[in-house]
Image (cartoon, rainbow, N blue to C red):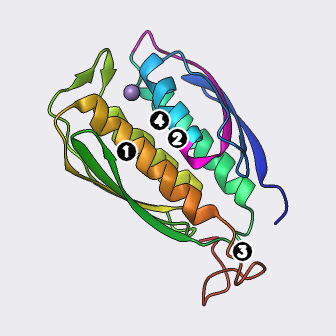
Amino acid sequence: MAPRSAEVSRKTKETEISVSVHVDGTGRSEMATGVGFFDHMLDQLSRHSLIDMKVSAKGDLHIDDHHTVEDCGIAIGQALSKALGDRRGIMRYASIDLAMDETLTRAAIDVSGRPFLVWNVNFSAPKIGTFDTELVREFFQALAQNAGITLHVTNHYGANNHHIAETCFKAVARALRMALESDPRQPDAVPSTKGSLKG
Ligand SMILES: [Mn+2]
């Protein structure tokens, strides 16, 4: 498999973001989004997917974190899609039930080229510190849409909202890692009867 890397820069009136990803990495991350909790979550995404990720964002945080979080999801998704190319030789499907203390969350992924998010996660508080919990969904919606992946995330149970958010990022990371692994039985094939995973 050729090295899977890409860079994306994205600038609007609301945010200015640059992202680089190296899919076949070691999980090294450098996050500077200006949103501390979000940096912590993106570190998990990188560390547990083994995708090296560098994200720097300057957003309109004087309004709130919404544009910055959503636009990082867009840019990371675009970078992943670009890095994956025609998606040849990948495992394509993966799922995991990921435990963290009292919390259990499932992520199921199809690296299909068809963007879709099914989100079954509820938070019991509107904030984790200063971070709006509803932005977790916004991030994964933007990621799924722009990476061209079908993503189902279900929180089975959990009490602590930090844990619930963190298991979403870790579960998606682990499932991504498995789905993007090369398939040794068909390293040169696009795993689809259509012959295409580009949507
Ligand atoms: Mn944590």
Q: Secondary structure at mark 3?
A: loop
Q: Secondary structure at mark 2?
A: helix
Which residue sits at x=58%, y=39%? 47
Q: Is residue 148 visible?
A: no
Tell which of 181 and 4 is nearer to you.
Answer: 181
Residue mark closest to the camera, 4 vs 1: 1
Tell me if mark 4 has few (under 14), some (14-19) or many (20+) residues whose alpha carbon lies within 10 angstroms of its own. Answer: many
The residue type indicated by label 2 comes to: Leu
**Residue 166, position as x, y percentages in the image:** 37, 36
Where residue 170 sits, quadrant-wise, is top left
Picture disc at residue 89: 3
The residue at which mark 2 appears reads as: 45
Q: Secondary structure at mark 4?
A: helix
Which residue sits at x=40%, y=60%? 96
The residue type indicated by label 1 comes to: Cys
Q: Is mark 1 within 8 Å of ligand 1?
A: no
The residue at which mark 1 appears reads as: 168
Q: Is residue 159 visible?
A: yes
Q: Is residue 128 above or below residue 165?
A: above
Name the N-terminal-most of marks 4 and 2: 2
Cα distance in 3D space between marks 2 and 3: 22 Å
Mark 4 and mark 2 in contact? Answer it, CB < 8 Å. Answer: no
Compared across the picture, whether 132 is left or right of 110 comes to left
Compared across the picture, whether 99 is left or right of 86 comes to left
Mark 1 and mark 3 in contact? Answer it, CB < 8 Å. Answer: no
The residue type indicated by label 4 comes to: Glu
Quarter of the rendering occupied by the C terminus: bottom right
Picture disc at residue 70: 4
Tell me if mark 1 has few (under 14), some (14-19) or many (20+) residues whose alpha carbon lies within 10 angstroms of its own. Answer: many
The outermost residue toward the bottom is 193
